[in-house]
């Protein structure tokens, strides 16, 4: 960790070359994940991209692990500010395991992906919902997962929206952590049943005052 933080770029490249092939396991380790975090903080764009390349194909597993989910959150949020194609590639993996073997589709949202795979629509939506369920069950509701929820909601039928609302209504406070989550919350309040709205508003009641003061989080409060 010290070498990655205080060393030169050459030192960092040497360390990373020695650890190549071990990054996935390190992300899930109680202590070793700190090394990955230091690389994300202090590594060059080239080294961070190499790390992403090694983690590709494993994001679906890493995103719902209690330790590595925080790293996936960091990688996704940073990528959406600097290289959105990396962020979208993470989301595509979270949508479905099929993207482990499919060619990249750029920054295509889920709706566009489904448009090109109409025969696989139900399977992909089922895969997407399953990662959402795992995220809530394992308390790994991070920014990439909230983006997945936004994409799922935008493509869901009314029956699928009802199912998602029933899944998250008792844990609605977890959705307020990002603009994506708040957007979905506002839609759930606007179009959900009276029973679902009651659960959602009850879950947000302790946070309403704070939510009302921020642009990204005030929409659910206004809807309620």
Image (spheres, rainbow, N blue to C red):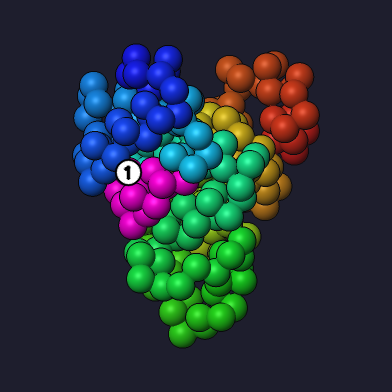
Please identify the dominant SS of the magenta region.
Answer: helix
In the image, taking residue 195 as reference, residue 103 lies left or right, namely left
In the image, taking residue 136 as reference, residue 204 lies left or right, namely right
Question: In front here: 133 or 180?
Answer: 180
Question: Which quadrant would residue 12 be assigned to in this image?
Answer: top left
Q: Is residue 162 visible?
A: no
Residue located farthest toward the front when viewing the structure as drawn = 10
Question: In front here: 100 or 110?
Answer: 100
Residue plotted at (57% across, 36% down): 78
Question: In front here: 59 or 218?
Answer: 59
Give the x, y percent position of residue 128.
43, 59
Quarter of the figure that contains the C terminus: top right
Give the x, y percent position of residue 87.
54, 49
Stretch in magenta: 49-62
How many residues crowd around disc 1 within 10 Å: few (fewer than 14), some, or many (20 or more)?
many
In this rendering, the answer to whether 99 lies above or below 31 is: below
In this rendering, the answer to whether 127 lies above or below 69 is: below
Residue located farthest toward the bottom when viewing the structure as drawn = 119
Question: Which quadrant would residue 63 be assigned to in this image?
Answer: top left
Residue at numbered disc 1: 62
Q: Is residue 76 visible?
A: yes
Residue plotted at (30% across, 31% down): 15
Residue plotted at (22% across, 30% down): 29
Question: In front here: 138 or 173?
Answer: 138
Give the x, y percent position of residue 204.
58, 26
Residue plotted at (50% across, 57% down): 89
In the image, taking residue 113 as reference, residue 19 lies left or right, namely left
In this rendering, the answer to whether 12 lies above or below 107 is: above
User: For the residue labelled by badge 1, is the local secondary structure a helix, a strand or a loop?
Assistant: helix
Give the x, y percent position of residue 5.
42, 18
How many marks do you count on the picture?
Answer: 1
Q: Is 222 within the magenta? A: no
């Amino acid at each position: 960790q010290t070498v990655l933080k205080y060393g030169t770029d050459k030192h960092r490249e040497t360390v990373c070359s020695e650890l190549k092939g071990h990054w996935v396991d390190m992300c899930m380790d109680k202590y070793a994940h700190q090394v990955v975090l230091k690389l994300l903080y202090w590594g060059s764009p080239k080294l961070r991209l190499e790390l992403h390349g090694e983690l590709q194909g494993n994001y679906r597993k890493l995103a719902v692990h209690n330790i590595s989910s925080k790293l996936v959150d960091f990688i996704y949020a940073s990528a959406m500010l600097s290289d959105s194609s990396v962020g979208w590639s993470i989301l595509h993996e979270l949508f479905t395991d099929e993207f482990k073997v499919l060619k990249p589709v750029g920054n295509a949202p889920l709706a566009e992906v489904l448009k090109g795979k109409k025969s696989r629509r139900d399977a992909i939506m089922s895969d997407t919902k399953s990662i959402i369920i795992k995220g809530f069950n394992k308390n790994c509701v991070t920014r990439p997962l909230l983006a997945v929820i936004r994409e799922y909601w935008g493509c869901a039928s009314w029956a699928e929206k009802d199912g998602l609302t029933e899944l998250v209504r008792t844990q609605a406070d977890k959705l307020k952590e990002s603009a994506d989550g708040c957007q979905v919350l506002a839609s759930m309040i606007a179009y959900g049943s009276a029973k679902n709205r009651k659960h959602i508003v009850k879950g947000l009641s302790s946070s309403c005052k704070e939510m009302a003061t921020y642009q990204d989080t005030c929409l659910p409060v206004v809807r309620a």
